Amino acid sequence: MGDEPFYIDQITNYISKHVLEEHEKDFNQTVLYGKDTSVDEIIAVAKRFPMMSEYQVVIVKEAQHIRNIEAIEAYAKQPLASTLLVINYKYKKLDKRKAAAKTIAKNALLFESQKLRDYQIPDWISKEVGNSGLTIDPKNAGLLAEFLGTDLNKIHNELQKLKLVLPKGEAITTEVIEKNIGISKDFNVFELQTALAKKDILKANRIAKYFEQNPKDNPFVVTISSLFNYFSKILQLHFSKNKNNDQVLAGELKVHPFFVKEYKMAARNYSPKKLIKIIGYLREYDLKSKGVNNISTTDGDLLKEMLYKILH
C-alpha cells in the first residue's frame, strides 16, 4: 500500500513471474481487479487449493477501488498456507490503528510504499543505474531528476531504454541523455542555475531564449520551482555553521557533495539581502505567470525580465 506505485508494481511483477513455473500458471495464477471484484470473491479464490502445484498466486490489482477492503481481515486471521495473495492498494493506506492492518501485519506482510522527496531522486537514479550495470555522475543524475520529475516508473522506463543502447559498464553522459531522452545538454535548468551562480549574463540569456522557443520542454512553473529551491539553499548556506565541512553541509542542504562547491560560489555572488529579494522576484513572477497583474506578457518575456532582476 502507499503513495508510490513503483515498488508495488515491482514486487507484484516479481511474484507474478517467479513463484510459479509457466506450466503451472494456467490453473494456479489469478489476477483480479478492484473495480470488478469484491472482498467475498477474493476470499473465495484465495481459499481454493492449488492444482498440481505447491502454491497458487492470487493478485488483486487496484484494490483501492474496493469499498470494504478492510473486510479482508476475516481471511487474514487464517490465511491458506498454499495461497500467495498479493493485494495492490495504490495511492492510499490502510489505517494502521484498525484491525485489518494489524492482523495483516501480524500474520503476513504489510508493505508501505512511500514517495521519495525531490532531493532523494538523484541518489535513487544513481543506484538504479548502478544496478543496471551502467554508471552516471551526480550532475547527470541531477539533470535526469530535474527533467523526469519524481515519477519512479517513468524514470525506470527511461533508464531501461539507456540500458538497451549502452554496453555494460558504460557511462550515461550528458551527450547520451541528449541523444536518447531529449534533454538539451547546454540548455536546461541545471545549466541555468550554474550560469546564475557564476553571474554569467550571456549564458543565462541564451538559456532563457531557448526556453522561450521550447516552452513544452521547459515550463515556466517548473523553472520557477527549481530556482526557488536553488536560491533557498544558497540562503540557507549563508547561515549554516558547517560551511567548512562539505559533507555535513551537503546533508544539511540535501544535495550531493558534488554540488557544494557551486553553492559556495553562488553564496559569494549573492548576499543574504539580495537572496531575499530574489525569492521575492520568484514569487512575483510566479503570480504573474498565473495572470496576477499581468494580461499579455508571455512566459518567455517574464523569464527574461525575472533573470534581469536576479542578475543586476
Image: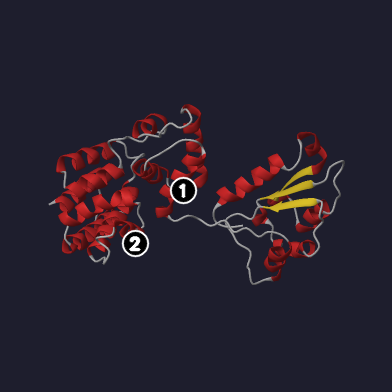
Q: Give the amino acid type for the residue marked by disc 2 in the picture.
A: Glu
Q: How busy is the neighbourhood of tag 2: few (under 14 within 10 Å), some, or many (20 plus)? A: some
- Work out whether residue 225 or residue 58 is closer to the camera in this orientation and state it: 58
Q: Looking at the picture, does residue 213 appear above or below residue 245?
A: above
Work out how far the residue at label 2 is from the one at label 1, CA to CA, in angstroms: 18 Å
Q: Give the amino acid type for the residue marked by disc 1 in the picture.
A: Trp
Q: Which residue is mark 1?
A: 124
Task: Decide if residue 51 is in sight here.
Answer: yes
Q: Is residue 49 left or right of residue 100?
A: right
Task: Decide if residue 295 is in sight here.
Answer: no
Q: Which residue is mark 2?
A: 252
- Work out whether residue 179 or residue 40 is closer to the camera in this orientation and state it: 179
Residue 102 x, y percent position in the rendering: 69, 68
Question: Do callouts 2 and 1 mark residues in contact (Cβ within 8 Å)?
Answer: no
Residue 187 x, y percent position in the rendering: 28, 37
Residue 248 x, y percent position in the rendering: 33, 60
Scheme of image coloration: secondary structure
Which numbered disc, 2 or 1, marks the residue that appears first in the sequence?
Answer: 1
**Residue in the image at 53% along x and 57% along y:** 114
Q: Secondary structure at mark 1?
A: helix
Q: Is residue 39 left or right of residue 239?
A: right
Q: Secondary structure at mark 2?
A: helix
Q: Looking at the picture, does residue 277 appear above or below residue 46?
A: below
